Image: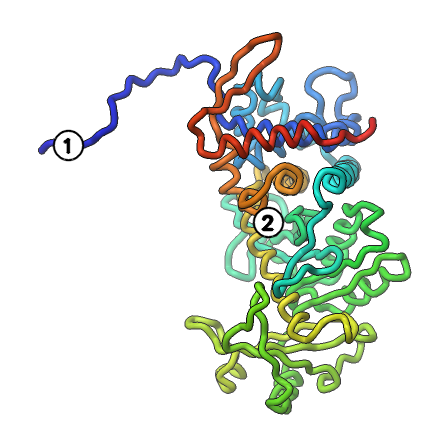
């Protein structure tokens, strides 16, 4: 049998010189410097370097975040950066990185969060000076006013015994972290690592995550900007909604849009609705959603104990094949979903409020991408080390989001991390020296060479924060 292969035969050896893989990851390392993240981390972790010798702890933390953003999954994956010292500089060994994570206690973790907020403020100022600022979140074919925060919890399976892991409600085993993402940019504002058996609807955890997320927003935006907090029905606890309402006297213009269970009183109210009050629902592009309608139930369901001005809205839709339906849905032949909001009348139609709430589903994609950027696997059996790892994973998500907001355009500005890695971060290049400078020469045949070169040019043009 004869083969018909057209590829030339290769002689493979491991003696190449001046060859660099994952050259695009240098973009993230330089962006961390340009946004002041490296300097802020250095200040935050200064006490972990008491004698002033060895690797800078802040630089180690940034290298770990860059490695996670580049797709690394374990501390040992730092070897990719370490073995390309001419591009990434001196990178700590795996044991040194382990010691850093082990040394990050509660105080150091709080300092890291404060450092992330400092760098975020610089990145947002750079976006205001070089682009059009922080982009608006969109729903129903329209820009949404202000900032939109999405809170959701997820399950992370652990295959070995770790501190505070526990059985999950899906009969797995691991952690149940709660996270908050900024829908405008995809930044990961805050996260709370919790045991696998932690409740999804715990008001105290929602309050903790929200407060941490608000602390990440620069003062100029936290005060005086409309902020919408979206959650699924797990965030509908009255204590959490009253906490959101209590932010307003502090100058934080926060409102909520949260899921609500379809209870028996809701069933009765839906059945009592006349057909003429149902209105066509919208798709995310603003077109009509086929087979879906929305209506308001405010005044027909007892909302005693909820913040004043709370409204309740329902959507009904013909179920798609395989949809999980309640007995009520089966009886009615329609799938029903309900949410609460305190957006006042006159600030959007019922259809617009519903499609705005439905856009909360984007957080599922954020979490899925975040799991491939660090918090899908935790490295240690020690809980505190895993908490520090989560914070660096959130930092990795931020670096990717800042790169898209500040440096990229077109399709890549909204691409998921997998595409960014394949097209930009994992690009190969050759190192040469000339005129007392080090040149990173990206392959002339790489399909996305112009986008990568342009991103480095945009990075060089960013204004630097004052030091």
Looking at the rendering, which quadrant does residue 132 occupy?
top right
Is residue 90 visible to us here? yes
Question: Where does the image place residue 46, in percent across and percent down from the top left?
Answer: 78, 26
Which residue corresponds to the image point at 63% horizontal and 28% vertical from the top-left?
457
Residue closer to the observer: 74 or 31: 31
Position of 280 relative to 410 (above/below): below
Question: Where does the image place residue 297, in percent across and percent down from the top left?
Answer: 69, 82
Which residue corresponds to the image point at 71% horizontal and 57% vertical from the top-left?
148
Total of numbered circles in the picture? 2
Quadrant in which the C terminus appears: top right
Which residue corresponds to the image point at 65% horizontal and 66% vertical from the top-left?
357
Q: What separation in Å lies between label 1 and label 2 (alpha carbons)?
A: 53 Å
Q: Which residue is mark 2?
A: 165
Quadrant in which the N terminus appears: top left
Position of 270 relative to 27 (above/below): below
Which one is in front in this view, the residue at disc 1 or the one at disc 2?
Answer: 1
Q: Which residue is mark 1?
A: 3
């Amino acid at each position: 049998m004869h083969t018909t292969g057209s590829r030339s035969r290769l002689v493979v050896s491991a003696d190449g010189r001046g060859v660099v893989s994952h050259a695009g990851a240098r973009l993230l390392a330089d962006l961390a410097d340009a946004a002041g993240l490296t300097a802020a981390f250095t200040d935050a972790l200064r006490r972990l370097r008491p004698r002033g010798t060895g690797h800078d702890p802040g630089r180690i933390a940034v290298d770990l975040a860059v490695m996670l953003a580049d797709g690394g999954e374990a501390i040992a994956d730092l070897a990719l950066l370490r073995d390309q010292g001419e591009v990434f500089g001196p990178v700590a060994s795996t044991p040194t990185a382990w010691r850093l994570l082990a040394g990050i206690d509660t105080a150091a973790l709080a300092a890291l969060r404060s450092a992330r907020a400092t760098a975020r403020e610089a990145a947002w100022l750079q976006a205001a000076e070089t682009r059009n600022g922080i982009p608006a979140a969109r729903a129903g074919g329209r820009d949404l006013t202000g900032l939109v925060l999405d809170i959701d919890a997820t399950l992370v399976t652990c295959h070995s015994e770790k501190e505070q892991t526990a059985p999950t409600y899906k009969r797995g085993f691991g952690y149940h972290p709660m996270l908050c993402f900024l829908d405008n940019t995809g930044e990961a504002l805050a996260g709370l690592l919790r045991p696998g058996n932690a409740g999804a609807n715990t008001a105290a955890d929602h309050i903790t995550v929200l407060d941490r997320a608000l602390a990440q927003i620069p003062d100029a935006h936290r005060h005086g900007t409309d902020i919408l907090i979206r959650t699924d029905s797990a965030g509908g606890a009255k204590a959490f909604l009253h906490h959101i309402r209590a932010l307003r006297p502090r100058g934080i213009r926060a409102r909520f849009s949260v899921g609500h269970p379809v209870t028996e009183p809701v069933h009765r109210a839906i059945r009592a609705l006349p057909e003429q009050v149902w209105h066509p629902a919208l798709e995310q592009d603003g077109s009509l959603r086929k087979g879906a309608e929305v209506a308001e139930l405010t005044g027909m369901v007892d909302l005693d104990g909820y913040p004043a001005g709370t409204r309740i809205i329902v959507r009904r839709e013909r179920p798609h094949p395989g949809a999980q339906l309640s007995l009520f849905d089966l009886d009615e032949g329609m799938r029903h979903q309900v949410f609460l909001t305190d957006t006042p009348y006159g600030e959007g139609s019922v259809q617009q409020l519903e499609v705005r709430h439905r856009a909360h589903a984007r957080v599922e994609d954020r979490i899925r991408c975040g799991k491939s950027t660090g918090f899908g696997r935790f490295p240690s059996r020690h809980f505190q080390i895993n908490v520090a790892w989560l914070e660096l994973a959130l930092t990795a998500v931020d670096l990717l989001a800042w790169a898209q907001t500040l440096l990229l355009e077109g399709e890549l500005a909204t691409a998921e991390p997998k595409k960014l890695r394949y097209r930009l971060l994992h690009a190969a290049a050759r190192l040469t020296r000339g005129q007392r400078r080090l040149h990173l020469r990206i392959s002339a045949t790489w399909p996305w060479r112009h986008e990568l070169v342009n991103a480095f040019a945009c990075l060089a043009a960013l204004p630097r924060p004052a030091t």
